[in-house]
Amino acid sequence: MTGHLSTLEWGRSAPMGITMDLLTPKIADITEEGISMSGDLTAEALGLTDTDESIRGTLAVGLDLRSVERTICVTGVVEWTAIRQCVRCLKEFDDPMAFSVRVVYERETKAAPVTAKRDDQRKKKAAPAVEVEVEPEEPNNDIYHYVGDHLELAPMLREQLILAAPMHPLCMDECVGLCARCGKDLNEGPCHCVAEPTGGPFQVLRNLKQKNEEAAGR
């Protein structure tokens, strides 16, 4: 599948087997009772490039959508396998990933058009701004906006997926990296380079670099 559902669970009593686009659900179909959607997506369907995230296979997506007054709450889980390059040994490795979706969508409102002023004492008072309340039990939800009759979920999922990627990927926590002199992968065993004296300037720099990577990436 590349973004379409094979099965949709619509609330608790709706029929099964309804086909719907996973990335552009219709607003009118999202009720207070909620709908559940699941399917497999390709990187292309989310607009991902190899620079954003290199994906092996497809992404498994499961989402619950529920209308709450004038907002739409979207929760769920996205799972995939990323192809990364270790920052120490430079080898590619598979990195199983998953993140939880917890966002709300609000309808984007257009700014009121500017009107010419009139010397009329019977001026109408401006309508008070309507504030959309997010569910109190979920105060940290990210807020997105929609227009028209459908939600556009691809930009949100793409953004959340990129944010979930580690800044300093490691093939394993114990990775010792490459020899600074000959470039041998020290995970495969020691090289034949002459060891530097303990506390030498290059050793100190390597230790400092490794500590900074561990602090930033874990």
Image (cartoon, rainbow, N blue to C red):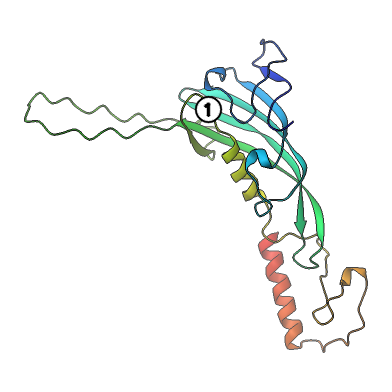
| Residue 164 on image: x %, y % | 66, 49
Give the residue at x 88% y 88%: 194
Specify the quadrant of the image occupied by residue 88.
Answer: bottom right
Vertical comparison of 203 with 56: above or below:
below
Q: Is residue 145 left or right of residue 34?
A: left
Residue 115 rendering spot, x and y as whole percentages: 19, 33
Tell me which residue sits at (31%, 31%) in the image.
129
Q: How many marks?
A: 1
Q: Is 18 displayed left or right of 73 in the figure?
A: right
Q: Quadrant of residue 45?
A: top right
Kindly identify the residue that appears in the image at 71 percent across and 71 percent down: 211
Q: Quadrant of the C terminus?
A: bottom right
Secondary structure at badge 1 equals strand
Q: Which is more toward the observer, 65 or 94?
A: 94
Tell me the residue that label 1 is attached to. 72
User: Foreground: 95 or 212?
Assistant: 95
x%, y% of residue 137? 55, 32
For the N terminus, the image quarter is: top right
**Residue at 13 percent of width and 26 percent of height:** 123
Q: Is residue 160 above or below residue 90?
A: above
Q: In the rendered image of this protein, does residue 183 appear above or below residue 108? A: below
In front of the other: 122 or 4: 4
Q: Position of residue 126 (x, y in %)?
A: 22, 28
Name the amino acid, label 1. Answer: Ile
